Image: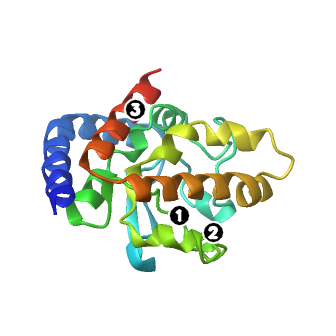
Amino acid sequence: MLKRLFDIIASLIGLLLLFPFFILIALVISIDSRGGIFFRQVRVGKNNRDFRLFKFRTMATGSDKKGLLTVGGRDSRITRVGYYLRKYKLDELPQLLNVLIGDMSLVGPRPEVRKYVDMYNEEQRKVLLAKPGITDYASIEYVNENELLAKSDNPEQTYILEVMPAKLLLNQKYISEQGLFTDIRIIFKTLLKIVS
């Protein structure tokens, strides 16, 4: 209950304070490339339920049909503006709407697409008992995941066999430690990681 109250207050304040910045980002995206301002993708949330996640669009329209993983910071599908939005995690800011609606929390396991959730084993599926979040331990540890995958000869296989299991272990760690103070600590660590 306290976590939800914190999420509502923090996301509402964040949306109000960042609204002028959202307008600026929207203008830059629309000038830079054709397509909508937002990218909405179906992700898997708490209790294995699908929901639509909001992001600022950072790729050419229809790029998700060419693959779900982004490989390297200079993936050819990423727009010029999109590169910087991704680098500083600004594309994630619209997820404050998901938090306000109640689909997500500020902190929690990052929501995955159905294709990869269907590969979870029984133990890994326990992460679906928690509400997904904008950030978590795995987001901090794998802040440069795209660059890591770019070094692989088979990025998707590397993701499935190495990255995804490691992230899920960090998700499980969060679930065992979750609480308001843990959430606040993770939020500050995330901000420091992005800045550095």
Residue nearest the viewer, comparing 115 with 57: 115
Q: Which residue is mark 2?
A: 116
Residue 30 appears at what percent x and percent y? 39, 43
Three-letter amino acid code at disc 2? Tyr
- Residue in the picture at 72% in, 61% down: 160
Residue 82 appears at what percent x and percent y? 50, 39
Q: CA distance from mark 3 to mark 1?
A: 22 Å
Q: Is residue 22 left or right of residue 40?
A: left
Instruction: Give the secondary structure at mark 3.
Output: helix
Asked if one can make out residue 112 in the rendered structure from this viewpoint, the answer is yes
Query: Are the residues flagged by discs 1 and 2 in contact, CB closer than 8 Å?
Result: yes
Q: Which residue is mark 3?
A: 189
Mark closer to the observer (3, 2): 3
User: Badge 2: few (under 14), some or many (20 or more) residues near its Cα, within 10 Å?
Assistant: few
User: In the displayed image of the protein, which residue is found farthest to the front?
Assistant: 176
Q: Earlier in the sequence, mark 3 or mark 1?
A: 1
- Residue in the picture at 31% in, 46% down: 183
Q: Quadrant of residue 159?
A: bottom right
Q: Earlier in the sequence, mark 3 or mark 2?
A: 2
- Residue in the picture at 45% in, 78% down: 48
Q: Quadrant of residue 24?
A: top left
Instruction: Give the secondary structure at mark 2.
Output: helix
Q: Is residue 102 left or right of residue 43?
A: left
Three-letter amino acid code at disc 1? Glu
Establish if 76 lies above or below 88.
below
Q: Which residue is mark 1?
A: 112
